[in-house]
Amino acid sequence: MKGQMSILVKGIYLILILIAIAIVMNRITSIQLTSSQQEMVLRQRTKADSILQTLAGNVNCLAYEEKGNLEGSILELSSHRLLDKKKLDDFSSQFSDIQPSCARDFSSGYRVRVETLPVNVSSIEKSTKGGVFWDILPLINGKKVVFVLDVSGSMSDPGGKCDVDVMKDTKICCLKLFMYGFIDEMSEDSKIAVFPFGDENGCNPQLLFPFTKLDGTSTREDLKNKISFLSPYDGTPMSSGLQKGFEYALANGGEAIVLLTDGQENICRPPTSIDIANNYKHTGIPVYTVAYGSEADVKVLQEVASITGGMFFDARTCEELVSKPKEKVEAIIPPMVWEFGDVEFSEKEALKSTISVSIPVDVFVDESTRIPGKMSITLVNGELEEFRGFIDKSCLTGKDFQDSFSFHYPISLDQTASEKKLCLEISGRKVCQKLACQKTIDFSSLTPGSYRIYSKNEDNVLKVIV
């Protein structure tokens, strides 16, 4: 009996050891899978961003000019790409269901959407343009916003006409006027928090007040009172302020950050503000940067805005920062939307990955009208996209290729004199992508399975050989 008990105990120990080993191996596999997935997402995000930059920065695509800017315009310092409305109109018609020839991808499918913000004519015409405040307000109204504000020593310098503070006509006075405007004008469902940097807290900026809902006159007056006590102090730890702003926004459901500075980050580095922006760009929280005065580090602020999907604004004087539009124009330019690229994509088991990326842009309408907006891309990898790219690449380059493919669903070619579509049959319906190839394609269909496939160009025929 004693011997049997010993065998039983050993058996139990062995089972427990095997279970422990299985758990550890499963954990290792999960970690490896997670790492692999992260690498794939990073590659796809990089590709999506590259396609957007090509579309927005190339005059053969959508750019108004190669640099995506207009020399001498109010957007000259903007980090945004400047798109040509006429080209957008052409793209949405010519490439409504196929990738544009200037940015074709042979391994992925994608669809692009460009949309502008609804704008009052007064915000885009130089003769009636108001201060930066009026540009930022519609972008953040009704949201939870963290303001990261420079109160360094240079904010005591002259900044323009301002009388809301004992330090009249200084930059700090205008900063307060800037903040009073948001407190007064933002809707009651808005919530704001403030992190000043450059004060006595040095490299460890402290919260002036947490997210507070602007739901009454007394609340707004209380917040103004707290803002009124801000005073210039020391250096410019901009990266520390931005770090604190991101940490607080991320922990408390923040939806945007407004960063205002008049100088260059000169203490508490590294990391730099660009490092911080890169560290937090995955959060999707945009940073709207404001360069106040002539000494602000425009390039850094442009880069921070670009990395995070925000917008850059430049105000050399107090008037440019907070002035009201000189004329009240009631005409509104409604939002405009353009779409182009592939329409349908791989689904279910045929789908491998999908990712969406956006960048801020401006749309050139005419010499007096440039409208802010964003350009978004949805990039898809799957069985349909890879095989369509294989055929188009061979056809358009005139080169012969070979590759291995696996299909979870039947795949076939719909070919007419005017167009050719490659289709997956999924759950009784066809999901198709248009081919750019103009040659006759010698291919009919394949059943689900794995294949080694060859392409061969012969005169005006592309043979797809299994």
Image: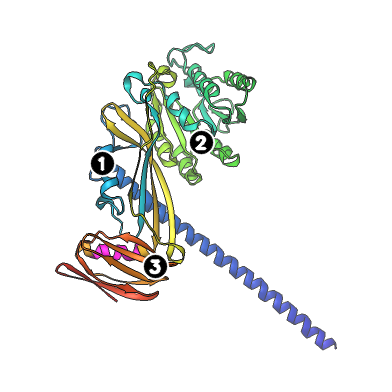
* Residue interval drawn in magenta: 385-394
Image quadrant in which the N terminus is located: bottom right
Real-space CA distance between mark 2 and mark 1, rounded to the nearest whole angstrom: 31 Å
Q: In this view of the protein, can residue 147 be seen by the observer?
A: yes
Residue at the extreme left: 459
Image quadrant in which the C terminus is located: bottom left
Relative to 306, residue 378 above or below? below
Q: Which residue is mark 3?
A: 425
Q: Which residue is mark 1?
A: 87
Position of 425 with respect to 417 (left or right) is: right
Q: Which secondary structure, mark 2?
A: strand
Q: Which residue is mark 2?
A: 256
Residue 248 lies in quadrant: top right
Question: Which residue is depicted at the point 82% across and 88% down?
Answer: 3
The mark lying in front, picked from 3 and 1, is 3
In front: 183, or 17? 183
The mark lying in front, picked from 2 and 1, is 1
- The amino acid sitting under disc 3 is Glu
Residue 457 lies in quadrant: bottom left
Relative to 65, residue 137 above or below? above
The count of marks equals 3
Chief secondary structure of the magenta portion: helix
Residue 359 spot, x, y in % from top left: 39, 42
In front: 466, or 286? 466
Residue 391 in magenta? yes
Q: Which secondary structure, mark 1?
A: helix
